[in-house]
Image: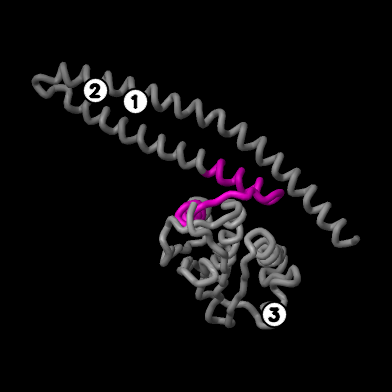
Amino acid sequence: MEENAKQMIEKARLISLHNLIGGISHNMKSPLMSSSGGILALKNHTRKLESLITDLNNNGEYSEYLDIVSDMRKWEDTIKNYLVYMSDMITAVKEQAASMIGTQHRKFTVGELFSKIELLLDFELKKSNCSLNSVLNVNEDTCIEGDISSLTQILGNAVINATQAYSDGGVINLQADAKPEGVLFTIQDFGKGIPSDIKNRIFNEMVTTKGKDGSGLGLYFANIAVKSQFRGSISIESEEGKGTTVFITIPIKTSI
């Protein structure tokens, strides 16, 4: 009864968080759409302006203005790419929040999964001065059944944990290999490692190596989600001073 009560409280918190993120994403999407429309209008005006200057530039006296127009075009493309990135990021975060309060039984590919992970973690990796070495040793069209946002969150949390194992950045390996039982995802760092007394309890208790900065929820809930949502398995190897490797095996579908 006590455990059920805790789960109900936690789910209520997650629902509140989901509603908050949903409201924020809606309010951010509107100005992003308006900005995208503005960029499109600017591109049309720039094209007309370039055509007009080109017609007047018979003797080359307006070449400087053509250079300005060319620079404007580059900035328009750059801003457009930033807007697309922000829109994709908002959508991904919203999906992450939705995945926390319920599983959507769908199918997705390993290629789609890796793309989402790299998108979501781009800022976190730069902030921590870490680089992600992604290796796909399986066909990118390999199909997994379940909610892509949930598995993205699980693998993403493992990568974030790996960034925090370094004091001043480092390399993190994210690899997918084909195994008889499914796809084996490996997240490896070469940081400080996990003490043996914590390593033995990390999937069964909410323990952390980060002191007041950690909650101990990441791998604890990852263990539950991998087993309940994907019928997979998760394990960890770590040695202090040498690094940590997380192994997550997920069953696959033969077709999408």
Disc 3, SS: loop
Query: Magenta part of the protein: which range?
Result: 89-118
Which residue: 20% across, 28% down? 64
Count the labels in the image. Answer: 3
Q: Earlier in the sequence, mark 2 or mark 1?
A: 1
- Cβ atoms under marks 3 and 1 closer than 8 Å: no
Foreground residue among 122 and 140: 140
Residue 7 vs 240, above or below: the answer is above
Which residue: 67% across, 65% down? 227
Residue identified by numbered label 1: 43
Dominant SS type (magenta): helix
Residue identified by numbered label 2: 50
Q: Earlier in the sequence, mark 2 or mark 3?
A: 2
Specify the amino acid type for callout 1. Lys
Label 3 environment density (alpha carbons within 10 Å; few <14, some 14–19, many ≥20)? few
Quarter the N terminus occupies: bottom right
Residue 247: image x %, image y %? 56, 72
